[in-house]
Amino acid sequence: MSEFGEIVVYSCFFGEPESLNMASMGEGRGYRRAIVTDDPDLRVPSVEMVYDDLAPLSPVRASRRAKLMPHRYFPDADWCIYVDNRLTLDVRPVDIVRHAQTQFSTNSRTVKRMAFRHSVRKTPFEELDRLYSIGIISRSDWKTTNDLFLSAGLQSDDLTMNPILVQKMGDDATDELNERWYEVFLTLPARDQLALPLVEHTLGRKLARSPEHFSTFVTWPAIPRRNRATRLLRVSDRKPKLFTFSRIGYKFRKIQSEMDIRSAQGKRNPSSE
């Protein structure tokens, strides 16, 4: 046990097509390692296996239960560190906890959970537009979510990327935000960084943001970026060959998304017109 009490480093493995990456949770010296999974037969030496039934959700939706609500899975822990199965943990978990503790002590307005800022995009609108433009989400989902953000008066410019999340356990306000985060996540396109700013805006509370770049603590992604980007696209949305009907449809969707996004940006920032 560390100076900060019992630390649990955990990952989620739901219907994954990739192999399990144990480098994401480190060596396990002086802290607990756990995997939350829908596979009852999965076994890893020196790692706790926490079974969580997939039904009736998709793997993406189900995997976020433990990611966003660790208090339901590890109620006796003092600290929980969620790590995505596709990253490599480069430091000791106690160093991450010490860093997070500093963020909590310097900002009384935050709940006892820390995330890292997105390294490319700043706002949930930028993330939403990106997902639409590359075909990850449909036009209908993009429009519905955009309208929801506008009606809520969302002004966040503090977008996170969440392959690693750190939480000090036992704080009711943090658990309440987590519950609401998952609740809202289920109603939006399957990206938890889209739901978080809306929840923070609604509750008037927010996660602490690390002043450090996430690469200080982890290597992300373990999968080469261009390979991951290609796999994220649905097969129907990848760029088809020239002179095919699929290519015409692809070009139409690209033009449509560009027009939609340009129009939406004017409504988001009416003073800029």
Image (cartoon, grey):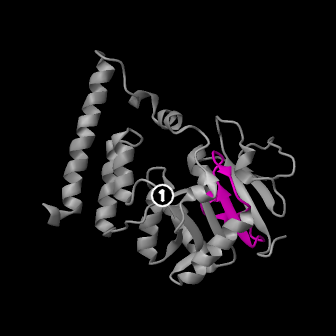
> Can you tell which quarter of the image residue 197 is in?
bottom left
Position of residue 20 in the picture relative to residue 181 (left or right): right
Number of marks drawn: 1
Q: Is residue 1 left or right of residue 247?
A: right
Residue 35 included in the magenta stretch of the image: no
Examine the rendering and report whether any part of residue 103 can be seen. Answer: yes
Q: Can I make out residue 173 in this image?
A: no
| Quarter of the image that includes the N terminus | bottom right
Residue 245: horizontal and vertical position, in percent? 29, 18
Q: Say which residue label 1 marks.
A: 193
Which residue is more in the foreground, 54 or 90?
90
**Residue 97: where, in percent of width, then height?**
68, 70
Secondary structure at numbered mark 1: helix
Q: Callout 1 environment at 10 Å: few (<14), some (14 to 19), or many (20+)?
A: some
Kind of residue at badge 1: Gln
Q: Residue at x 48, y 33 (%)?
A: 230
Quarter of the figure with residue 29: bottom right
Indicate yes or no whether the magenta region holds residue 67: yes
Q: Quadrant of residue 175?
A: bottom right
Q: Is residue 42 above or below residue 156?
A: above
Compare residues 123 and 247 and report the one nearer the observer: 123
Task: Identify which residue is drawn at 29% across, 66% down.
Answer: 151
Residue 78, position as x, y percentages in the image: 75, 73
Quarter in which the C terminus is drawn: bottom left
Left or right of residue 230: residue 68: right
The residue furthest top is: 243
Residues in magenta, as a range: 66-92
